[in-house]
Amino acid sequence: MSILYVLFFLGNCLTACQKKIPSQSLQIFALDTFITLSADGNEAEEAVKAASSSLTALEKRLSRHIEGSEIDNLNHSSFGSPVTLSDDVYALLSKTLDMASKTDGIFDPTVGALMDVWGWNKDPDRIPQQDRIDEALSTLDYSRIHLLDDHQAYVDEGTIVDLGGVAKGYIADALMQQMKKYDVVRIILDLGGNICGWAKDRAIKVGVRSPKEESAMIAIVSVQEGSVITSGAYERYFEVDGKRYGHIMDTRTGYPVESDMLSVTVITEDGTLGDILSTTLFACGKEEAMELSEQLGVHCILCMQDGTLLVSEELKGSVDAQQGWTIQYFG
Amino acid sequence: MRNKDGQSNISAKKRHYPERRFKFASGDVLILLAVVIASAIMLVGVLFYEQSVKSKTRYVQISMDGQVLFKRDLSEFEEPMEYQLTVPEGMMVIYISSEEVYVKESPCEDKICVKEGALTHVGDGAVCLPNRVVVQIVAGEGESQKGPQDVDAVAR
């Protein structure tokens, strides 16, 4: 009789293996990047469709480049005519200002004017004149955003709020929460390289792209649920006289960050925080990045020029270094 | 050392143990049979999996504005070709061979798509944001779209 049970069990396993789980994937251009929304499960199609609609709606509220968005309205506000923000945009701005304060302004959402001066939205092949950089810097200070009661807010004249450094993480979190309400077993959101993933009953494996070699990875990270977000200057940059200028701006100097690291990867359940901190830690430099990540309890991989990966102690067992890279734990 | 009959001393000194005959109980036979069948099924499973991974078909897929314009099995490219695509900013040239695909020329400012370099594995892709073009290596219908080492996605 026992053998019958064994055969019955194995038969079931094989049937389960062969049973095809519905899978759905959608690729779209939004948030000034390329996005892939994927899900597996009986309601994968519905989940992806709903996420796609939400993505469009959230972009319409958060992008400063869309006329009439809440952030565009905020950028046209003043002391005399504040704007009323929705609950979630107000909450996101509060969190953003809190992080700007905790990072001592290294992360600053009022970076809009500086991004425009450097032309990161178009014509990036030039270095701006110093007086234009100085002018942009004079508008760059998170204390120039004023959150009032009743969800009202305004900015000081000239200040341009740009949530480019936080919106993708925030939106990924929102979409993930929404998609998990459907009958799905796996969700992978790729927002321009920011990965947010979840799977029922197994860990997600996320590769971290090598800043030195295309198509190669420095490590593979296993996460139960959460975001894996990388920042570096190896993809979006331009060169003038052999010098590389990356797109992450140093809010103190007004020039692109010159980091002693090749890239920073933050692994966190809070995508909003991860998005903010991957950029901030990269801008900080190695020593300060290690200190700040410990202080804020965020786990990260700091990719160094010499092939060392400085990895938070808490990630022991979840990070698998790839060929040519060596892990050193800290914390 | 051998004795005069050419037999080894060891066999000559063979000790006699009390005879103990092993007898299979019916339950033992069933368990053994179950183990053998389970092992055979697992072996077939592993071989099948390895075969499916090795034989994953690689397609080059070029799309613009979400519309797939070109999709071909890479193994068909005995001779490399250059696919020319008219995009909003001008002309884009994509090199395709049986081994690799890459964006050779692009009229865009930042050239991120060109910097992406060679695409060789399923899951690799180059994106030109200004022209809304995506060049990808994808697996065939029904095959896993996961990248090398079975990663679910790549952070960059």
Image: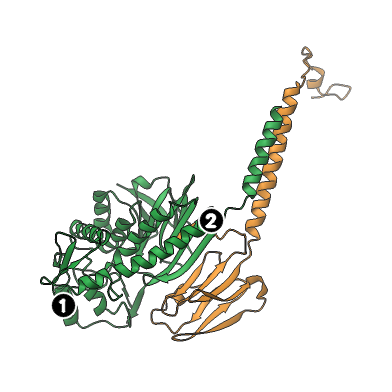
Chain colours: A green, B orange
Point out residue A82 in the picture as x, y percentages from the top left corner. Answer: 15, 69
Q: Write the residue at 62% across / 47% down.
A: A17
The kind of residue tagged 1 is Asp
Q: Residues within 10 Å of mark 1 (few under 14, many from 20)?
A: some
Q: Quadrant of residue A128?
A: bottom left
Point out residue A211 in the picture as x, y percentages from the top left corner. Answer: 40, 65
Point out residue B86 in the picture as x, y percentages from the top left corner. Answer: 51, 86
Badge number at residue B21 = none
Q: Quadrant of residue A258?
A: bottom left
- Say which element carries label 1: helix
- One can see residue A162 in this view: no
Identify the chain of the residue marked 1, using the numbered disc in the image. Answer: A
- In the image, is A256 to the left or to the right of B87? left
Instruction: Name, please, the residue furthest toward the top.
Output: B18
Instruction: Name, please, the residue furthest toward the right.
Output: B5
Q: CA distance from mark 1 to mark 2?
A: 48 Å
Q: Quadrant of residue B2?
A: top right
Identify the chain of the residue marked 2, using the numbered disc in the image. Answer: B
The kind of residue tagged 2 is Gln
Which one is in front, A151 or A300?
A151
Relative to A95, residue A314 above or below: above
Badge number at residue B149 = 2
- Say which element carries label 2: helix
Q: Write the residue at 36% across / 50% down.
A: A328
Q: Which residue is mark 1?
A: A134
Q: Residues within 10 Å of mark 2 (few under 14, many from 20)?
A: few
| Disc 1 to disc 2: CB gap under 8 Å | no
- In the image, is A269 to the left or to the right of B22? left
